[in-house]
Image (cartoon, grey):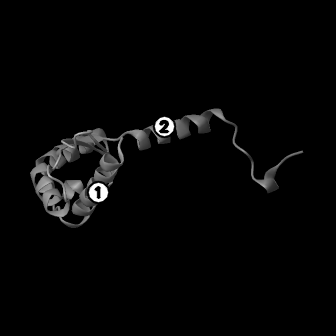
Amino acid sequence: MSRRTEQVAEAIRRIISELLLMEVRDPRLSNVTVVDVDVSPDIRYARIHVSVLGDPEEQKSTLAALRRATGFLRTELAHRMPVRYVPELRFQIDRSTEHAIHISKLLGEVLPQEEPEGERRG
């Protein structure tokens, strides 16, 4: 990724995060965190990776609400970013947090638990 696309991606991440926190009134979007943004080399498309708390049905509902808010978010990006073209926004659930929790749980089951210092037998 070029320096320019990295700067645009970071600006989009920051602005979308602020908008979701302060401007968007949809209660389904209250548990969304923008994790990362990937921007195409021509800055026409931005894939926004979001983390959503909740079960798969809540995640699906939240993703639908994000897609409905895309017009508003692009308009606000146009006002806040000095770019010729505002990228088309594509939202995607980021599952890395869920994956990390799952791996941690599996490791907890496999690895022996250390006993606290005072409870050692021997």
Q: Residue at x 82, y 49 (%)?
A: 120
Q: Secondary structure at mark 2?
A: helix
Three-letter amino acid code of the residue under disc 2: His
Residue 72 coordinates in the image, percent (x, y):
11, 56
Indicate the quadrant containing the N terminus: top left, top right, bottom left or bottom right: top left
Q: Nearer the viewer, residue 89 or 59?
A: 89
Q: Say which residue label 2 marks.
A: 102
Q: Is 31 positioned to the left or the right of 117 in the image?
A: left
Q: Residues within 10 Å of mark 1 (few under 14, many from 20)?
A: some
Three-letter amino acid code of the residue under disc 1: Ala
- The residue furthest bottom is 22
Q: Say which residue label 1 marks.
A: 11
Residue 119 coordinates in the image, percent (x, y):
80, 52
Q: Quadrant of residue 28?
A: bottom left
| Contact between labelled residues 2 and 1, with CB atoms less than 8 Å apart | no
Q: Quadrant of residue 20?
A: bottom left
Do we see residue 94 in this rendering?
Answer: yes
Q: Is 48 positioned to the left or the right of 3 in the image?
A: left
- The residue furthest top is 110
Front: mark 1 or 2: 1
Q: Residue at x 31, y 49 (%)?
A: 4
Do we see residue 32 in this rendering?
Answer: no
Q: Nearer the viewer, residue 108 or 13?
A: 13
Residue 47 coordinates in the image, percent (x, y):
26, 41
Mark 1 and mark 2 lie on one chain; the one further toward the N terminus is 1
Q: Secondary structure at mark 1?
A: helix
The count of marks equals 2
Residue 35 coordinates in the image, percent (x, y):
36, 49
Q: Residues within 10 Å of mark 2 (few under 14, many from 20)?
A: few
